[in-house]
Image: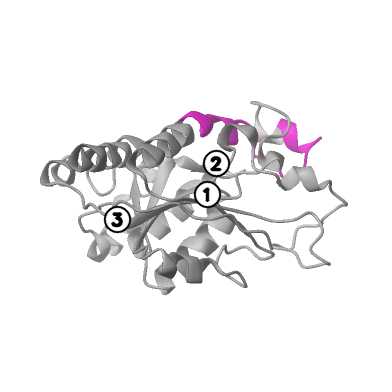
Amino acid sequence: MRLLQCREVIIIGPSTTEMNMKRDFEDHCWKDIVNEELLEIYGAYKRETFVGPRSAVLAIDLYNKAYKGGNRPVIEVNREFAGSCGENAWKAIEPTQQLFAAARRAGIPVIYSTRHADTAGVHSTNRRMKEEAESEYHIYEAFKPEPGDLVIYKERASAFFGTPLVAHLRRMKIESLIICGESTSGCVRASTVDAYSNGFHNVLVEECTYDRSMLSHKVNLFDLHHKYADVMHIDEVVAHLAGMVRKAA
């Protein structure tokens, strides 16, 4: 397992102004599939959302395989490149670059998870796997790790399961995670639930997460938002990180 050295952390919380700019709790992508009855059932989860203190970005599986076939409908690219997220992945590139740039300006750690092609028969899901090149799981060029970033190699869906991620987060005194990547219903969900179970405050950046299925994407963001994470929009998170820079100046 290859690990890179971590960078220093700037510890500054959200300002009152940033807290007040939050949208309505349900102002998210699932509005077209969730009815009023379900919102009433989940009403007890409504709360104020925020980026927590001592944050790090956790980028889940931003590897080449997810982008293969280009910016085309998922059904098209999957006929040639099984496992690609097609246009859903490509739509998330620009907001994810915004997130990374804001995090680096604020001096908070950027942590990646990925896997190796050969995991000795251990698979993250039950999907039929074919022989793959190691380069399939290299981080996509738009998000190339920088010196000081941490890269975690995993074999199961969660970035926490069987890896030293918690140990590194504790050593860096991280309390909160800003999570992005793919897939929403798979490795992002598994990692978010494990992060919550380990006591971290989680933010999922809506525009920076994606899935092969938009239905799975929306349903899982809705469920995670109400139980295990604060789903926030990229502009909210970037504004918070910009506030950290201003306070540090």
Q: Which residue is mark 2?
A: 146
Q: Which residue is mark 3?
A: 39
Any part of residue 23 in sight = no
Q: Which residue is mark 1?
A: 149
* Label 3: element kind: helix
* Label 1: element kind: loop
User: Which residue is rendered at x = 64% and y = 42% of the image?
Assistant: 139
**Where does the magenta region start and end?**
76-94
Q: Are marks 1 and 2 in contact (CB under 8 Å)?
A: yes
Give the tally of numbered discs.
Answer: 3
Specify few, some or many for label 1: CA neighbours under 10 Å numbering under 14, 14-19, or 20 or more. Answer: some
Specify few, some or many for label 3: CA neighbours under 10 Å numbering under 14, 14-19, or 20 or more. Answer: some
- Viewer-nearest residue: 10 or 17: 10
Any part of residue 133 in sight = yes
Measured as percent of width and height from the top left, residue 136 is found at 75, 44
- Looking at the image, tell me whether mark 3 or mark 2 is earlier in sequence order: 3
* Label 2: element kind: loop
